[in-house]
Amino acid sequence: MISILVAGAVALAVTLLGTPVAIRVFRAWGWGQRIREDGPHTHLEKVGTPTMGGIVMLVALVVAYLATRPTIAAGITFSPAGLALILAAVGFGLVGFVDDFLKVRRQRSLGLSKAQKFLGTAVVSVLFSLLIVATSGDTGTSTSLSFVRPTALDLGVFFFSVWVFVILTSSSHAVNLTDGLDGLAAGSSILVLAGYVFIAFWQFRHTCSLELPAEALKACYKGVDLLAMQDTAIIAAAMMGAAMGFLWWNAAPARIFMGDTGALALGGLFGAIAITTNTQMLLIILGGLYVIETMSVIVQVISFRGFGRRVFRMSPIHHHFELSGWPEFTVIVRFWIIAGLCVAVGLGVFYADFIARGGLD
């Protein structure tokens, strides 16, 4: 528990104190945000705001993870699950950085092509899945399809790797779509990460490898590795602290944006944690806000290309409410509320499964 608190506190301090430095440096380097020409006209005033703030969040994540090592029992260094999660976050963040850098260099709102982004995220996803599969005995990660626990449907190594790619790529792009208003992605991510801190720590406390009362054995989590879940909780807490510190400077009116660097890193980490905690399908509920944002884009595209009509004034859906007259901050707070409700429902489903199986606490 101490290591989880240390991770969150260190990451919070790094982004809270480091982001103002990044703002000055990025502004001096000319790393300013480019705005979509077809976006809300109120966003034009944000042109030139420093971007790529996700770099600070990733630095905070790594520093916080390393800072927890002295608090871990002697002889224990890094878990395969922890390294895999860091790989996912940093790998997706690197893809986002390249995209952001090209936007800045070309002075336009287009960076990597869809094919290039697809290839980049595919490479990171494959590396993550290979590491997870190769160390499954140490991570406790199942290759089966999972909801709140692994199901009887074993995907096998090949299809599991494909499934990992789908989850990580979908979650990363979903968060990226949501990152369109000041603080929206950062604030909602804090809530999702808090949910995963609880889930990972709960599995850590209720693994079947521990000496539990006989009546609790039906509810415990089989095959879960203690160190893997501890590191998963630590990394979720570290990124949560990093997002909190960053939100201080990213809240409306934002002084810096996380860019694709931060959005892809956050989304990729969500998907990776869902894999290591065997809660793949539960991510759909926990990240319900991102699902809504993504579906609004899909519905808009299908409707416009198929019928020549728009369902929303603009997609993603947060722009629809902006153009409907809602103040930006009102949209942000109400979407945070939706994100919080989704996390609450997801945690309720997770805990209900534990209680239904005979769990007592």
Image (cartoon, grey):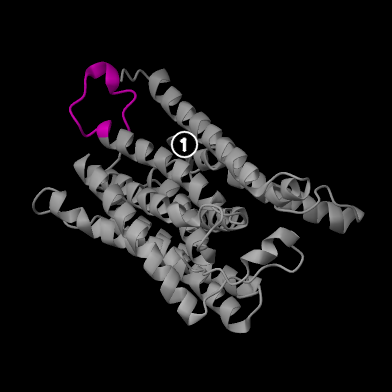
Taking the magenta stretch, the answer to whether it contains residue 217 is yes
Mark 1 nearby-residue class (10 Å; few <14, some 14–19, many ≥20): few
Seen in the image, is 253 located left or right of residue 29?
Answer: right
Q: State the quadrant of the C terminus.
A: top left
| Pointer 1 residue | 151
Q: Nearer the viewer, residue 173 or 131?
A: 173
Where residue 288 appears, as percent x and y from the top left, is: 58, 40
Q: Residue furthest right?
A: 308
Q: Nearer the viewer, residue 312 or 304?
A: 312
Residue 99: image quadrant is bottom right
Q: Nearer the viewer, residue 330 or 300?
A: 330
Looking at the image, residue 184 lies above or below residue 354? below
The secondary element bearing badge 1 is classed as strand
Looking at the image, residue 11 lies above or below residue 280? below
Tell me what residue is drawn at x 47 percent, y 42 percent: 192
Looking at the image, residue 52 lies above or below residue 340? below
Q: Residue furthest left?
A: 74
Where residue 302 appears, as percent x and y from the top left, is: 81, 53
Taking the magenta stretch, the answer to whether it contains residue 186 is no
Where residue 248 appears, as percent x and y from the top left, is: 44, 52
Question: The disc labelled 1 sits on which kind of residue?
Answer: Thr
Q: Which residues are magenta?
A: 205-221
Q: Nearer the viewer, residue 254 or 351?
A: 254
Q: Main secondary structure of the magenta part?
A: loop
Tell me what residue is drawn at x 59 percent, y 72 percent: 48
